[in-house]
Amino acid sequence: MKSHLKIESRQLNILFDSLKDLGYTIVGPTVREGSIVYDNIDSASGLPVGWTDEQSAAAYKLKRRGDNSYFGYNLSPYSWKRFLFPPRVKLFSAAKKGKSFKINSDSGNASVPIMSLPNYAFIGVRPCEIQAIKIQDKVFNNWQYIDTVYKNRKEKVFIVAVNCTQAGGTCFCVSMNSGPKADNGFDIALTEVIDKGGHYFIVEAGSEKGNELMSKIPHTVAGQSEIENANRLVQTTARQMNKSMDTKDIKELLYANLESRHWDDVATRCLTCANCTMVCPTCFCTTVEDVTDLTGENAERWKRWDSCFTMDFARVFGGNFRSSSRARYRQWMTHKLASWIDQFGTSGCVGCGRCITWCPVGIDITEEIEKIKEKGGKGEYFNHKDTKVTKEIKKD
């Protein structure tokens, strides 16, 4: 299962054709509208060949590489969750029938027979994104609460992981133990190598489905020097990361600083635009909307993505229990890095850095953790006027 194989870059199209022969709809990275996004593609020519991206806080730019690398970019603003946990899902529709109504059960995605759902093959899933999918498994597909839309889609996915051979400007996956190399959670994993020996991929199969696919693709057993070249690229990527997050006792740090004066500083910068939650590969907040036509004869219920940064998210009868920017940013970061651990046994952050890149004002979650340590690392609480009030854990 863990033997290393080698395929030449020109054989990548055979991989695509083999997946299509197995009935998969292929989704992968492609260049569109000034960025690299995940969308349906038919062949290797649809990949961002020769393109890379430069990312920093509040900045993203596409640029040409000096080679024909297929996966020489960092991360898309999209995440794979949009295919497993769609941004908008019709739960059901209903039609008025006299004094009663009829539920049209065949209209909601939650009740669509699994055989009619697409068999997705995800091409180019980064190690941090594999970790994000595992986290969403804990949210949507655990033993107690199951989201049937997510479960049915996830069961049919074939994952082609790609190990990272360059570090993005906002990546910190090493801190979160989620990259830059995938150890499991994939069907096959590729490491792209371009050197004097040519342009090739080192391949590891991670499942029986992966082994079956590789049996259809011309390959050789990778030599030791070729494996070492691939490993060296991944190790160099880990050393290149210029961002990190100290996660030691991070849950206790955040719980002990719910009233830190630093939250007021963040509030002066945060636009509460929800960009960070929309690009995050693990955020899962939703809301439900009911709509009717003008006749009042037909109605639909939809579930769509929402965000803890929106005013309506915390609006309940009697008011809004999280009305300030300060409270909403604190909720997002404390949930992501602390209470998520209590709920699901894992951090909600994988170190992909999307929230840093796509924040319009460049708020950096790694820097915010450091500032909280500096201003309230001893577990001291501050009210909004920076007056110390208690040293015990308080709840918002």
Image: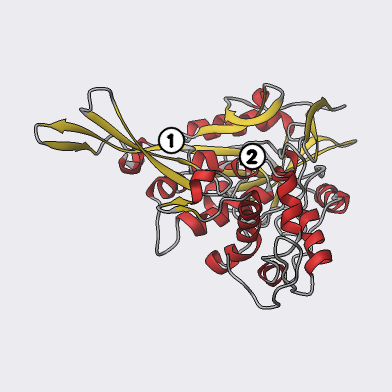
Observer-nearest of 272 and 382: 382
Percent position of residue 310, x then y: 55, 43
Residue visible at 62% across and 36% down? 78
| Secondary structure beneath label 1 | loop
Measured along the vertical axis of the image, is residue 285 above or below residue 72?
Answer: below
Residue 355 image-quadrant placement: top right
Measured along the vertical axis of the image, is residue 360 above or below residue 33?
Answer: below
| Residue kind at label 1, given as amino acid type | Pro
Residue bearing the label numbered 1? 118
Percent position of residue 208, x then y: 53, 52
Observer-nearest of 107 and 224: 107
Residue visible at 76% across and 35% down? 73
Horizontal relation, residue 299 to residue 23: left or right: left
Residue bearing the label numbered 2? 275
Measured along the vertical axis of the image, is residue 267 above or below residue 289?
Answer: below
Observer-nearest of 74 and 292: 292
| Residue kind at label 2, given as amino acid type | Asn
